[in-house]
Amino acid sequence: MSRIWNFSAGPAVLPQEVLARAGDEMLDWHGSGMGVMEMSHRGKEFMGIAAEAESDLRSLLSIPPNYKVLFLAGGATLQFAAIPMNLLGGKGKADYVVTGEWSRKAVKEAESFCDVGIAASAEDRKFTYAPAQGAWKVRSDAAYVHYCSNETIGGVEFHWIPETGGVPLVTDASSHILSRPLDVSRFGLIYAGAQKNVGPAGMTIVIVREDLIGHAQKGTPTVLDYKLQADAGSMLNTPATYGIYMAGLVFKWLKQFGGLAEMERRNIAKANLIYDVLDASRFYRSPVAKEDRSRMNIPFTLADSNLDATFLEGAERRGMIQLKGHRIVGGMRASIYNAMPVEGVRALVDYMREFEKQHG
């Protein structure tokens, strides 16, 4: 069977070893006579799968014991509302950093629940950089500060963790979680949709400090109340069981690779292959400030946008798909998550050089 190089921003490529194991276990998980999709989420088989997935995630990220790990449904976008519902307490205000489309969406949702302050924004340069810490204006009485640590669409990544004093820091880490080590203790809450570096769409990870939960606003739906979900082990209602199972397989794959430090080394090497081509060329351009370039999502443009369709057609003939940039920014975008092998990246850069010779 021939596999293509899938540069999709999400749902995205998954490790081939994980897919193969899931296939082997599809009809019969460990002699149970049934597949994971058929299991009761209350049964001992799935309860064991979920517990092991959480244990492996805690190990990978060195999650402190005073943090709850939740496996929730609804995608990261649902957390745009769940976060203010759970974290505002009686303060009624929260600060947001705006670095692209996803942080803008988070702001829009939060405005329905509280007074939103814009602590910093990169709109002045069309969301092509991460505002320096010195530019942030955080209100001391804000309930939390929210930022998107990797903007999937614009390809802007924070390679540092902001300091917010005593105000809890919240991050949407959907498109780069598990791509590198992360000091969880610096955050009040971390959340991430699964469909980029963790597993199939439909499951969201929330890692939240214990002291921040239990204060949900009146009217918060039961399934969005972090305290109730934590008390129920993420099983207040039927969770995304197969998504949790697949995430657990990905966690084991990461551990077999040597953990997140090794994965970071590989991701830096892969990203540099593409950025080296962009920096050496007048035919291609990277719009993002060098110090803030994402290792996961790499947008670039061609000198002549009339060649975009030709570039994409040629790539597809060579087995490379989903390279078209998001409609908001145009151009191209290569998403090279953990599961993208270096061979796929090399195939792309070889094609980019060939295309430039033909059309540059």
Image: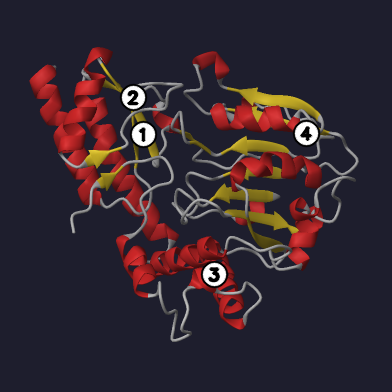
Of labels 4 and 2, earlier in sequence is: 4
Against 271, is 242 above or below? below
Q: Residues at badges 1 and 2 in contact (C-beta under 8 Å)?
A: yes
Q: Is residue 6 visible?
A: yes
Of labels 1 and 2, earlier in sequence is: 2
Identify the element where label 2 is drawn. loop
Q: Quadrant of the N terminus?
A: bottom left
Of labels 4 and 3, earlier in sequence is: 3
Identify the element where label 1 is drawn. strand
Identify the element where label 3 is drawn. helix
Alpha-carbon distance for marks 4 and 2? Answer: 33 Å
State the residue position of label 1.
Answer: 298
State the residue position of label 3.
Answer: 53
Q: Which one is nearer the viewer's eye here, 153 or 132?
A: 153
Task: Give the amino acid type for the residue marked by disc 3 in the picture.
Answer: Ala
State the residue position of label 4.
Answer: 94
Q: Is residue 66 left or right of residue 252?
A: right
Task: Give the amino acid type for the residue marked by disc 4 in the picture.
Answer: Ala
State the residue position of label 2.
Answer: 286
Task: Give the amino acid type for the residue marked by disc 2 in the picture.
Answer: Ser
Of labels 3 and 2, earlier in sequence is: 3
Alpha-carbon distance for marks 1 and 3? Answer: 30 Å
Q: Is residue 26 left or right of residue 306?
A: right
Alpha-carbon distance for marks 4 and 3? Answer: 32 Å
Residue 324 drawn at (x, y percent): 33, 29
Task: Give the amino acid type for the residue marked by disc 1 in the picture.
Answer: Ile
